[in-house]
Amino acid sequence: MFCIRKMRREDAADVAELERKIFTDAWSERTILETLEQKQTMILLAYEDKRLIGYLILYYVLEDGEIARIAVDDAYRRQGVASKMLWELECLCEDNGVNKLLLDVRESNVGACRFYEKQGFVRDGVRRNYYSDPVEDGILMSCEFGK
C-alpha cells in the first residue's frame, strides 16, 4: 500500500532520480529544491514503503493552480497512484483557496488525456509547438472544484 505526503528537502534526490527516468526534459535536483522553497508551491509524493513511486508539483496564485509535473514510476501505473495524488491535492487546494487546476499534456499522450478527463478535466485549447524534444503541441486542460 502506498501513502501520499508533502515533500521535504531530503526527498529531492529521489524526485530528481524519478524525474530522469520519466521525462526527456528532466529537472535537476537543484531545480526541484528551488521549486520546493517557493512560497506558493505544493509538492506531493507517493511512497510505497521507502520507495518513491510518484510525485506531483503544483504552482498556485490566488484561486488558480497549475500542475507543472505529475509522474508515476512505470511499475506503479494504473494502480491509482496519480488519482490519489490528485485527490490529496484537491483537498490541499481547497484549504488554500485554490478552486481551479490547469495543466498541459502532450498531444500524443492519449492515455494521459483520458486519465485527466476521467478526473474531471476538460480540454480548453491547444498550444502549438509547446513541447520540445520532440516538438509537439500541448493540450491545455482545466478542472474546477469547490465552488
Image: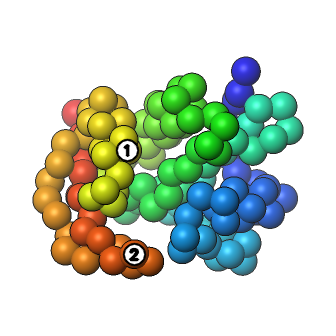
Which quadrant of the rendered structure holds the C terminus? top left
Say whether residue 40 is left or right of residue 108: right
Q: Quadrant of residue 116?
A: top left
Q: Residue furthest top?
A: 1
Tell me the number on the disc at residue 68: none
Whether residue 75 is visible to the viewer of this picture, yes or no, is: yes
**Residue 91 in the image, given as x and y percentages of width and height:** 47, 33
**Residue 102 in the image, given as x and y percentages of width and height:** 30, 54
Tell me the number on the disc at residue 112: 1
| Amino acid type, label 1 | Ala
Kindly state the secondary structure of the residue where label 2 is placed.
loop
Indicate which disc, 2 or 1, sits on the residue closer to the N terminus: 1
Say whether residue 16 is left or right of residue 123: right
Q: Which residue is mark 2?
A: 134
Q: Which circle, 2 or 1, is nearer the viewer?
A: 2
Q: Quadrant of residue 76?
A: top right
Q: Residue at x 30, y 29 (%)?
A: 118
Q: Residue at x 66, y 37 (%)?
A: 75
Q: Residue at x 37, y 44 (%)?
A: 112
| Amino acid type, label 2 | Pro
**In front: 137, or 62?**
137
**Residue 124 in the image, given as x and y percentages of width and height:** 14, 53
Q: Residue at x 25, y 68 (%)?
A: 137
Residue 100, compared with residue 16, is above or below; it is above
**In front: 5, or 78?**
78
